Each structure stands twice: as structure tokens, then as C-alpha cells.
Image (cartoon, rainbow, N blue to C red):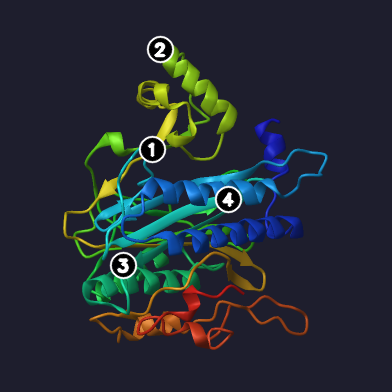
């Protein structure tokens, strides 16, 4: 199919079948998170947890659309990552890795599922402890959650991406935390997990993105990462990187036999979506992938770290900008939080009081949500286990 034909056939939320597929993918990824969360216990191997979630997603999606004439691609859209404490993201170790969880760890679980290329992603933060989360751990999770709630209300047709960036940084500051630099919230389309429209989490002199306005019938992965540290994560060890994505616009004649073998396997199994090196022929993986990355055939997702002792929280959700309002389709209930800070800023409170639904009456004119539109229970996420992070419409 040519680019022109693909452009003409681009499917979005105006098609009910597309909405159904997004919601089905969301249901599966939510269940995968629910499945793996109780298994996050002291001494649990991280690689086993990652594989359990990915296997569940593959199994559940594999049971769908079996009898259709045209083959429908489906499965893992982003391999499960479990990043702990000051590790920011993308930790998804290879088989044989012995890294385990420990009591008191701040555990960030990140995963994605797709059906026919329609992607739902989610990330959730959980502390391995009994009872309410207190102190700076509670602050950093509350900062991420409240920023996510504000983003949910500001990512709406007519609003600009820079409005969201400024707002979530203000929320993080209210908890004496930082939004982690380099994290982008992306528009998603069919088979596109990282579309061109983005929200920059933390603005800075070295990081700029094009101004963009949100539009009806778009889908976004809203990605919020907060830190008690400086919010400037670093790559410490390239060998920890295990997640890659095929760069479809790049070509190069690989010199090494191992590289050609691995690249052929990747092209067959994972032509578009990010994948874990765990899923490849492991004996040749490390050697073959290096040449592919060096020549830009693969885009790596590096494991990034804040400084030891810093605490990092991650909340990510998928939102559909439907004509009747924003529909957050992925999420999970947080533990009870008792942060040391309370948010008294009137502007933040005003953002949180915005509705996420539009009321359509009479002629069905589209209106922006107003205060109180199905959102009263979602307006105060800071002081207790936030209901809005738990419910699906």
C-alpha cells in the first residue's frame, strides 16, 4: 500500500469499530496490570513479572478475531517494563536476569497492547508495603497522579500542548517534585505508538517541540514521570537496554551474519511495534543488535536513572478525545497516599474541577465540559486514594 493510499484509509475514532478496538485493547492491558500487580512482592524476579504480563496480553489478543477473513495484527504494543526506585523507565531484563523486588521498593509498571494497530498503554506506580504510603514516596506519586488528572482535563479539543506542559510542571512543583525531562506524551494512530503531535513534559532550553492543538477524534498516551530529584535522568549502562523499535524509514546493508539474522527475525516478528530482545534468538541478540542500532535501523529505549536515593513515580494512560468528551480507558487504583504537601493553588484546583465530559442536548452541539460535568468525584485526587485514577467510564 502506498503512503497516499494509507493516508486516504487512515482510520480514527469517527469509526465505531475503531473505538471498539481501542477499548478492547485497553481492557486487556488493564487486566494484565491487575494480574501482575499482586505478584509484585519482595524477592519476585522482575523478568518473570514482565514475561507474565506480556504472555497474558499475547494470549488474550490471540483469542480475538480468530474467524475473520483478513488477518488482524494484535498483541504486545510495548513490552512490560518494571522499573524500581530511582530507575526511571524501560527496565525489562533478559531471561536469566536475577534482579528481584525488595520490601519498600517503589515499583513502576509500564505496558501496552494493540488490536489491529489500535494501541492502549498504561503505567502505574505501587510501593511494596502495607498501609498508607507516606512521606516523599507519597509526594512523588501524588505529584504524578495529580499532574495526570490535570493533563486529562487539559488535553481536549482547542487546547494547546504547551498549556499541558506548563500545568503539569506547576503541579509537580506544588509537591516539591520535578517532572522528569525527556518524557513525551504522544498522539497515537493505527500502528503508530509515537505520533508527531506531542506534549513535552518538562520544557527546557535544549528541548523543544512543535506547537500543536488537540482535536476531536484523536488518541493520546499521556505520560507523566515525576521525581524527588533533579528530573534529569541519565543512561548508566547501555547493556541494560533491551527494548527497541524498527526504524521503518532507515535502510543499511548489514555486514555481520549475526546482525542479518537478528534483523530478519525482527522484520518478520516486529515490523512496527516496540519489542523486547527477550523475544529473539538470544545467543545472537547482543552482537546483532549493536550493528543494527549503530546504523539507525533500530531505535533503542534506554534504561534511564535518577541519582541513588531519588524516588521516581510514573503514571501513563490512554485517552480518546470523543465528541462527547475525554474517555480515559486505561488506569488502576492507587494505594492510599498521605503526602506531606497539600495543593492549595487556585489555578490547580480550577483545573481539577474541570469536567471531562461534554453535555450534548437538543441539537447535539459539542460543548467543552463544565465544572461538575460528571467529574465531582474526580476533582480532589491529592488527599486520598484517587477515585479518578481507578474508574473507567
Q: Are marks 1 and 4 in contact (CB under 8 Å)?
A: no
Real-space CA distance between mark 3 and mark 1, rounded to the nearest whole angstrom: 34 Å
Number of marks present in the image shown: 4
Q: Which residue is mark 1?
A: 94
User: Which image quarter holds the N terminus?
Assistant: top right
Give me the residue at 56% from left, 36% from top. 272
Q: Which residue is mark 4?
A: 57
Query: Label 3's element?
Result: helix
Real-space CA distance between mark 2 and mark 1, rounded to the nearest whole angstrom: 23 Å
Give me the residue at 43% from left, 51% from top. 49
Real-space CA distance between mark 2 and mark 4, rounded to the nearest whole angstrom: 34 Å
Of callouts 3 and 2, the N-terminal one: 3
Residue 290 position (above or below residue 322):
above
User: Which image quarter holds the C terminus?
Assistant: bottom right
Residue 101's spot in the image, x, y percent? Answer: 31, 56
Q: Nearer the viewer, residue 200 or 46?
A: 46
Q: Residue furthest left?
A: 308
Q: Which residue is mark 2?
A: 256
Amino acid at each position: 500500500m502506498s503512503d497516499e493510499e494509507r493516508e486516504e484509509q487512515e482510520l480514527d475514532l469517527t469509526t465505531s469499530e475503531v473505538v471498539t478496538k481501542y477499548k478492547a485493547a485497553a481492557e486487556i492491558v488493564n487486566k494484565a496490570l491487575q494480574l501482575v500487580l499482586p505478584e509484585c512482592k519482595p524477592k519476585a524476579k522482575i523478568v518473570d513479572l514482565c514475561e507474565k504480563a506480556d504472555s497474558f496480553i499475547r494470549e488474550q489478543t490471540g483469542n480475538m478475531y480468530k474467524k475473520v477473513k483478513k488477518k488482524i495484527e494484535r498483541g504486545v504494543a510495548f513490552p512490560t517494563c518494571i522499573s524500581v526506585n530511582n530507575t526511571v523507565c524501560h527496565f525489562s531484563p533478559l531471561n536469566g536476569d536475577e534482579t528481584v523486588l525488595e520490601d519498600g521498593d517503589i515499583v513502576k509498571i509500564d505496558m501496552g497492547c494493540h488490536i489491529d494497530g489500535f494501541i492502549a498503554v498504561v503505567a502505574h506506580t505501587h510501593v511494596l508495603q502495607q498501609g498508607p504510603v507516606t512521606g516523599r514516596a507519597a509526594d512523588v506519586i501524588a505529584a504524578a497522579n495529580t499532574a495526570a488528572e490535570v493533563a486529562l482535563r487539559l488535553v481536549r479539543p482547542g487546547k494547546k500542548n504547551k498549556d499541558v506542559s506548563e500545568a503539569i510542571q506547576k503541579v509537580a512543583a506544588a509537591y516539591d517534585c520535578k517532572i522528569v525531562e525527556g518524557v513525551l506524551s504522544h498522539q497515537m494512530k493505527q500502528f503508530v505508538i509515537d505520533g508527531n503531535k506531542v506534549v513535552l513534559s518538562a520544557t527546557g532550553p535544549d528541548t523543544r517541540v512543535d506547537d500543536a492543538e488537540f482535536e476531536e477524534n484523536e488518541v493520546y498516551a499521556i505520560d507523566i514521570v515525576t521525581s524527588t530529584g533533579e528530573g534529569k535522568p541519565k543512561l548508566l549502562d547501555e547493556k541494560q537496554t533491551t527494548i527497541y523499535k524498527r526504524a521503518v524509514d532507515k535502510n543499511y546493508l548489514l555486514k555481520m551474519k549475526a546482525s542479518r539474522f537478528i534483523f530478519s527475525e525482527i522484520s518478520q516478528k516486529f515490523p512496527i511495534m516496540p519489542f523486547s530482545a527477550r523475544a529473539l534468538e538470544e545467543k545472537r541478540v547482543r552482537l546483532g543488535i549493536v550493528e543494527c542500532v549503530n546504523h539507525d535501523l533500530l531505535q533503542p529505549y534506554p534504561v534511564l536513572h535518577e541519582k541513588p536515593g531519588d524516588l521516581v513515580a510514573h503514571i501513563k494512560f490512554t485517552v480518546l478525545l470523543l465528541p462527547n468528551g475525554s474517555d480515559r480507558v486505561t488506569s488502576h487504583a492507587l494505594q492510599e497516599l498521605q503526602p506531606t504537601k497539600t495543593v492549595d493553588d487556585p489555578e490547580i484546583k480550577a483545573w481539577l474541577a474541570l469536567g471531562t465530559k461534554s453535555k450534548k442536548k437538543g441539537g447535539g452541539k459539542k460543548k467543552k465540559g463544565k465544572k461538575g460535568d460528571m467529574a465531582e468525584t474526580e476533582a480532589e485526587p491529592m488527599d486520598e486514594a484517587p477515585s479518578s485514577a481507578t474508574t473507567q467510564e
